[in-house]
Image: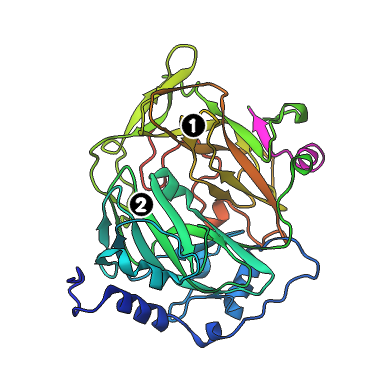
Amino acid sequence: MRSSTGSSPQSPLVWVASRVSAAVSPASSRRSHLALPESGNGVLPRQRLLEAIDAGVIDGGAFTIPESNVQPASLDLRLGEVAYRIRCSFLPAEETVEAKMKDFVIDELDLHREGAVLETNRPYLVPLKERLVLPPTIRGRANPKSSIGRADIFTRVISDRSDRFDDIAPGYCGPLYLEVVPLSFAVKVREDLSLNQLRLSVGRTTLDDDEVRAFHRQTHHLLLREGRPVPTEELALANGLFLSLDLIGDPAGTVGYQARENAPLLDLTATVPLDPEPFWEPVQREGRNRVVLSPQRFYLLMSEEAVSIPPELASEMTAYDPTSGELRTHYAGFFDPGFGFDPSGPHDGSRAALEVRAHDVPFMIEHRQRVCKLTFDRMLEPPDLLYGEAMGSSYQHQRHTLSKHFRRRS
């Protein structure tokens, strides 16, 4: 097979091995040590992630990890220098990803310099620049970045000898790979772009429903409606806190957007926000504040409630399939501490953008229908920097569903 990078005719898997080997620093050849509070439980905050980088627990090998990639409770992972088009998705089970992928590679794309185009509905596998040398007590979890989910790009992390996507086992030592599947738009990507994020945690982190209810009532209001806390007795909890749809929308009745069919190339490397018109068409509500979703079309809608994540907590939006099986909402994503939270003023929250797709038949949704769920994790410590304007965060107090890649509509 001839490489699309124009390099010498070398086996793609040999090339992967040489790239991965070149990225391994001496720090990652040993089990690294990270000092954490004794008997601590929680998600590692920004300052602890920086310590983990210094200790070699998170290792960039020959590539320095930019401090700007470290978020309040997560790390932006970077694409490496090459992407492999593969004929199917897979999990490595008892093997390494490198060994398992040998039978599935179709083509090799060079992400260095100008980058490459990833076509819709085709899986690609990209070795990431970061690798992990986790202590036995620390585990990881990855999710797509919000901007990537809103562009309808399906991503998930694969680690060696694992039977689960996105979950990194405690004590894992090895490389990370990202499966990427553009769904609505062909996309241009290049080395160093971040499409997903990683959290590290230790011990029991997730709040159960009673703990969420008590935290909302006694410590901090997590959910607000029209600027006022949702009464505790009105919270909908079932292994997480449900959010509902806003299908009132703006005065013109626009409630969100759906991806256009046959849209142009979406250049994720562009430095200037793109005109949304070729990519998105507005969604208008019907009478009685409802919308009928077309099968397999991708929609961006908004939650009715606003979310406020205090420094003590982090949150994850979990993928949700109603028992009818006709609707899927959200690819899952992280909310860092400080999302919708203003330490100097009233905490009026920020609404969540919801990624929605109907399955096989048209499906009707209504205003205030519950369509997605938040789970909450305690932080090991509050981060030294919260999500918000100080970090250049893109979605604090958002009023629009489109990602940062597009110009805001007036």
Q: Which residue is mark 2?
A: 181
CB under 8 Å between discs 1 and 2: no
- Which residue is at 53% across, 21% downward? 367
Percent position (x, y) of residue 94?
Answer: 50, 69
Pick the residue in front: 332 or 68.
332
- Residue 217 highlighted magenta (yes or no): yes
Percent position (x, y) of residue 179?
Answer: 40, 58
Visual colour scheme: rainbow
Q: Which mark is residue 97?
A: none
- Residue 344 highlighted magenta (yes or no): no
- Which residue is at 36% across, 29% downward? 295
Dot placed on the residue nearer the N-terminal end, 1 or 2: 2
Q: From where the camera sits, is residue 47 visible? A: no
Pick the residue in front: 140 or 95.
95
Figure label count:
2
Percent position (x, y) of residue 222?
Answer: 69, 39
Which quadrant is the N terminus positioned in?
bottom left
Looking at the rendered structure, the secondary structure element under dot 1 is: loop
| In this view, 16 is above or below 383 | below
Q: Which mark is residue 325?
A: 1
Q: From where the camera sits, is residue 99 visible? A: yes
Looking at the rendered structure, the secondary structure element under dot 2 is: strand
> Cα distance, mark 1 to mark 2?
22 Å
Which quadrant is the C terminus positioned in?
top left
**Amino acid type assigned to the residue bearing label 1 in the image:** Gly
- Which residue is at 23% across, 79% downward? 10
Dot 2 surroundings within 10 Å: few (below 14), some, or many (20 or more)? many
